[in-house]
Image: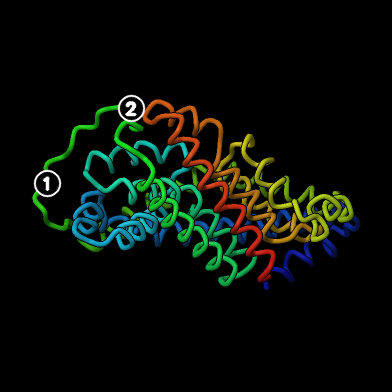
Amino acid sequence: MWLSSVDFFVYDFLALHGSFADSLHFFIYDFVKILTLILVIIYVISFIQTYIKTETLRDFIRGKSQFVGNLCAAIFGILTPFCSCSSIPLFLGFSQARIPRSATFSFLISSPMNNEIAIAILFATFGWKIALLYTLFGLITAVVGGYIVAKVSTDEDILISVPYMKHGGKVHFEKLPFFKRVNSAWQSALKVIKDIYLYVIAGIFIGSVIHGFVPADFIAKYAGADNPFAVLIAVIAGIPMYSGAATVAPLIEPLTSKGMLMGTALSFMMAVVALSLPEAMILKKVMSWRLICLFFSIVGVGIILVGYLFNIIL
């Protein structure tokens, strides 16, 4: 229905044709579709967040196996709308709350990589199967990465002293009337949309230019199926291009439509949002270079493996 309406508006009402018409069609269609689904998904996640605090996760993880703790922390990372840099204060809060280091790093890996905005855009663009696969691979990377970091890191790798919180050993849930939860979730969702909509517009605009004007042969030559190093190149290219998922995720559809394999495009997106030079500079204030390099290596290898797996199975 919406697609046919955009078709009529661009090609019949405006009587436009060619590359510019295709770009405008892409921009209008994706703008409404993506922002609508982001609003819905952010609202659902914001509603869930009204029940859960850091203390809730801390007390739930206590006494659980390492796998369960890492998985819970990784899932909690999906529920936190932060980029890699803004996840660090929560990382310190986890340490203060005595959450095990493996679970803490699982959260730090998962929060930017499994960004709910990226998941919403993938769902809007490619459907639930791609979004689910992306989320599952991201969770696996976070769980395994947290385990490895805990095995090889030491207390000396953490450069600041974090005072521990006192706790009562009970799982806490926020006690709020249902309608207050509904209103709080709505206000949170609106705030997120207000914060990111310009970045979403920028990403969709760039994607529309790629969709309408960039030759398919150009992308296919350097990042298509014939280049076995395409995933590695995409990850290396994404590291210095620090940006939020709201900007880079809308680029996945036009890139894949021009011949880039899905895994390569997703690897590029994950590298942009989960591996960044600003993040390394901020992390240097709280952990050693050895631990930072280890952290980046684990995440980088995980992203590369996810990219090749996606390319194989899709």
Q: Is residue 261 or residue 121 the one in the foreground?
A: 261
Q: Position of residue 301 (x, y in %)?
A: 57, 50
The quadrant of the rendering that contains the N terminus is bottom right
Could you tell whether 147 is left or right of 278 in the image?
left
Residue type (three-letter) at the residue carrying disc 1: His
Which residue appears at 50% of the width and 32% of the height?
Answer: 280
Among the 4 quarters of the image, the one containing residue 262: bottom right
The quadrant of the rendering that contains the C terminus is bottom right
Please say which color scheme the image uses: rainbow
Which residue appears at 68% of the width and 68% of the height?
Answer: 312
Q: CA distance from mark 1 to mark 2?
A: 24 Å
Could you tell whether 169 is left or right of 115 in the image?
left
Graded by Cα atoms within 10 Å as few (under 14), some (14 to 19) or many (20 or more), the crowding at tag 1 reads few
Q: Position of residue 2 (x, y in %)?
A: 67, 69
Among the 4 quarters of the image, the one containing residue 125: bottom right
Q: Is residue 199 or residue 216 the one in the foreground?
A: 216
Task: Say above or below: 292 vs 66.
Answer: above
Residue type (three-letter) at the residue carrying disc 2: Leu
Q: Which mark is residue 273?
A: none
Q: Secondary structure at mark 2?
A: loop
Could you tell whether 266 is left or right of 299 in the image?
right
Which residue appears at 57% of the width and 72% of the height?
Answer: 129
Residue named by callout 2: 159
The earlier-in-sequence mark between 1 and 2 is: 2
Task: Say above or below: 239 vs 18.
Answer: above
Q: Position of residue 143 (x, y in %)?
A: 41, 57
Q: Position of residue 260 (x, y in %)?
A: 76, 57
Q: Is residue 176 or residue 257 the one in the foreground?
A: 257
Residue named by callout 1: 167
Task: Say above or below: 279 vs 136.
Answer: above
Graded by Cα atoms within 10 Å as few (under 14), some (14 to 19) or many (20 or more), the crowding at tag 2 reads few
